[in-house]
Each structure stands twice: as C-alpha cells, then as structure tokens.
Image (cartoon, rainbow, N blue to C red):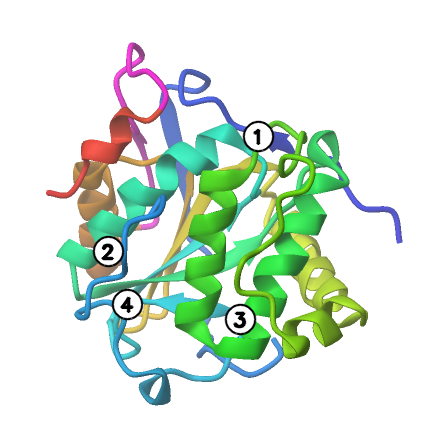
C-alpha cells in the first residue's frame, strides 16, 4: 500500500482552524486498535481504570470529551505543543487525550523509530509508561528527522520492550493509525480531533490549538454545531507560545 505524504505544520501557517464534524457514532476505545515534567496524580489515574492500549490514553478514562492527537515524534511543533496540551488536559478533567502516531516521511526513519519505541514502552508498561516514553523522546531527540544523539538509549528499556521492538507489532499499530489519518484528510502535524461521548459528534482541528479555542470547540460539540472556522492562534505567535494555554 502506498502511504500518503504528510507535513509538519508550523504554527504560523494557516490562521484559521477548519473544523469538520463527522456525523458518526462515538467509537469507544478498544484493544488493538513533560516535556520531562512528571505526570500529576489526577491525570495519571490507575491503569486498571483505563481500557488496554493502544491507543494510549492520558487523563480520566470516563471523561466526556476526548482529544485525539495526531503527532510525529520528530516534529518540532508537536514537541513544543506536547507539554502545553498536557497541562491543559490536567486542568480540564472533563477531557482526556488519546495519542495517534503520524510519522512524517520528511522525518524518516527517525520518526517511525521513535513511534516504535513509544509503542513498545506502552505495550510493556501501560498508559503511564507510554506517556513517559513520549516525554523522554521529545526531550531527547534532536528533531526534524535527526533522531536521538548517537549512543543515547532509552533508559527504561526492558526485555519485554526489546521483544516488542524485535517484532512487527508496533509497525502494525503505527501503520493503522497513519491510514486512519489519511482517511480523515489529516496530512500535517499536529492535528487534533475532538470527540464528544455525549453527542457522538467529532470536530477536526488543524494545528496547535490554544486553550480558549479548544474550549470553544468543545462548546460547539456539546451544542451539536455542524461546521465552524476559528483562529487557532495569533499570526505572530512564535513556536511554543501555546504552552501557556491552560484556561
């Protein structure tokens, strides 16, 4: 299968978020389918309360709303947005965060290598271990496809993780999430899809989205709106400013 090409989205590109509702039934999380700050207890609730991953979940398993984040572990804009979105989820227990891999061809092979490592960390240790691995990768990689510095290895590598890395299990997960992104017209990272368990509707948000815009999108979902276009950020907002976003 020929995979579509994707791009890493710069925060300055595209002043509007085009929001598209897929009028489809809510799909429950299922089996198989910061940057170095520690995970708060409120967000890192008991693993037993969450469905088995992948996909990997951050926040309350019973939250009404889910942010499905499509990200590349070599994308510098995803890296800048990661701790910002994490803090926002910590501040809004009614929303959780589900990770979907979208490694970009311009960042290969490092992007897929990072995704495989994170996926195998989750397989070996669960949700909390997955998010810890993602934070470590973002804080350690040189980014833009350069990957980890030579000689640097994941400090929590276990025999279970190594067995996963030696298999094709993580590749199947990553490939399935890339195909899903392409089917939804997602071609750049970061991208967010909001899902409302209450109404069964979704909204697609392109780019790093500030806290107020996320709250507005959630209000639209709850109200059952069909389409909307809203500015995601100031045109002068430099990379990483969305990191101040909890509101």
Q: Quadrant of the C terminus?
A: top left
- Would you name the residue on which mark 3 appears? 122
Q: Disc 3 vs disc 1: Cβ atoms closer than 8 Å? A: no
Mark 1 burial class by Cα count in 10 Å: few <14, some 14-19, many 20+? some
Q: Is residue 54 visible?
A: no
- Which residue is at the front of the view, 18 or 210? 210
The residue beneath circle 1 is 142
Q: Are marks 3 and 2 in contact (CB under 8 Å)?
A: no
Query: Residue 208 placed where, x, y %?
Result: 37, 34
Q: Quadrant of residue 19?
A: top left
Mark 4 or 1, nearer chain start: 4
Q: Nearer the viewer, mark 4 or mark 3?
A: 3
Of tags 3 and 1, the one toward the viewer is 1
Q: Main secondary structure of the magenta part?
A: loop
Mark 2 and mark 4: span between their CA atoms?
7 Å
Mark number, residue 59: 4
Per the rendered image, the range of residues in magenta is 226-239
Report crowding for label 4: few under 14, some 14 to 19, many 20 or more residues within 10 A (C-alpha).
many
- In-front residue for pair 177/36: 36
Name the residue carrying label 2: 89
């Amino acid at each position: 299968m020929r995979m579509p090409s994707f791009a890493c989205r710069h925060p300055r590109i595209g002043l509007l978020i085009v929001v598209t509702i897929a009028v489809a039934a809510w799909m429950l999380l299922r089996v198989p389918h910061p940057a170095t700050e520690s995970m708060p207890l409120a967000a890192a609730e008991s693993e037993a309360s969450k469905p088995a991953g992948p996909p990997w979940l951050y926040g309350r398993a019973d939250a009404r709303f889910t942010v499905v984040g499509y990200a590349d572990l070599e994308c510098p804009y995803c890296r800048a947005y990661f701790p910002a979105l994490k803090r926002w989820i910590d501040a809004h227990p009614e929303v959780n965060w589900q990770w979907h891999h979208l490694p970009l061809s311009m960042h290969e092979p490092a992007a897929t290598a990072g995704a495989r490592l994170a996926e195998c960390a989750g397989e070996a240790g669960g949700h909390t271990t997955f998010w810890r691995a993602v934070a470590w990768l973002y804080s350690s990689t040189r980014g833009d496809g350069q990957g980890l510095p030579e000689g640097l290895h994941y400090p929590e590598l276990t025999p279970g993780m190594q067995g996963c890395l030696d298999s094709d299990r993580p590749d199947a997960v990553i490939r399935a999430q890339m195909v899903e992104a392409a089917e939804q017209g997602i071609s750049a990272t970061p991208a967010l899809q909001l899902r409302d368990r209450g109404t069964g509707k979704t909204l697609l948000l392109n780019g790093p989205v500030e806290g107020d815009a996320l709250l507005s999108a959630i209000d639209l979902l709850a109200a059952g709106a069909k389409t909307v276009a809203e500015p995601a950020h100031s045109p002068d907002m430099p990379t990483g400013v969305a990191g101040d976003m909890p509101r």
